[in-house]
Amino acid sequence: QVQLQESGPGLVKPSETLSLTCTVSGGFITFYYWSWIRQSPGKGLEWVGYISHSGNTRYNPSLKSRVSISVDTPKKQVSLNLTSVTAADTAVYYCARHPGGAAKSGYYFDSWGRGTLVTVSS
Amino acid sequence: QSVLTQPPSVSAAPGQRVTISCSGNSSNIGNNYVSWYQHLPGTAPKLLIYENKKRPSGIPDRFSGSKSGTSATLGITGLQTGDEADYYCGVWDSSLSASGVFGGGTKVTVL
């Protein structure tokens, strides 16, 4: 049973960079796609972006200028960087696995981490 | 404002049936597969339905999914207190600003 664990600072100052890591255990990191999804307080889920097993990335257009996702296959880790954060970036950030990419039959999230709360505040 | 429209809340008594709608357009639901997720606060969201109507192993057949045109529906029969949660639909939007999108979420309350 694959498990995903998000980790990173719980507090980030405005204008700084939010950096999170998702560690995958109990399963392969290859052959899958990996997304970051966030939920701001009192709001719904928002897709941030994904990286494929081959390193191709797709990002939410509303965040595209500030976000980057990378993968370290030997460490079985997926990383998220979000630059120039504001209070609007305060959210629980989830890592999730999906079998396929954009508009493919495998675009569904079959495993999720429990999420990590990141607060943007000075 | 979510690209996909869900009712904010639905409610029913234990044992009853509820349906949750998810409305989109031809760029998303109309041409791509829909998935559904159950989310209890403080926990990882759980996949309930994928590819419009398929259930992952371990998901009871009380949960069902369907799609027609640019709308999708999640059905829950035999409602249980443990079903009280937030439910989200998700799909890829293939418009010019292509992106993954979710509905705004629906709170299911068991009366």
Image (cartoon, helix red, strand yellow):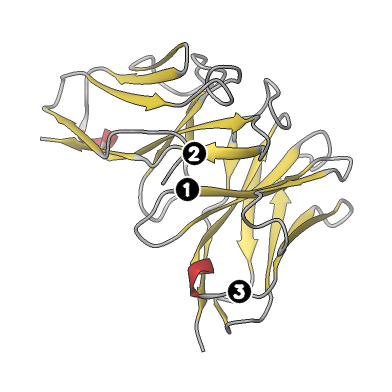
**Residue at image mark 2:** B102
Numbered disc 2: what chain? Answer: B
Residue located 34% across and 24% down the image: B21
**Residue at image mark 3:** A85
**Percent from the top left, x then y, of residue B19?**
27, 21
Residue located 51% across and 17% down the image: B52
* SS class, disc 2: strand
Kindly tell me whether residue B73 is visible in this rendering: yes
Q: Are marks 1 and 2 in contact (CB under 8 Å)?
A: yes
Of all residues, the one furthest to the bottom in this rendering is: A122
Q: Are marks 3 and 2 in contact (CB under 8 Å)?
A: no
Kindly tell me whether residue A80 is visible in this rendering: no
The disc placed on residue A45 is 1
- Left or right of B50 on screen, residue B21: left
Q: Nearer the viewer, residue B96 or A72?
A: B96
Mark 1 closeness class: few <14, some 14–19, many ≥20 residues within 10 Å: many
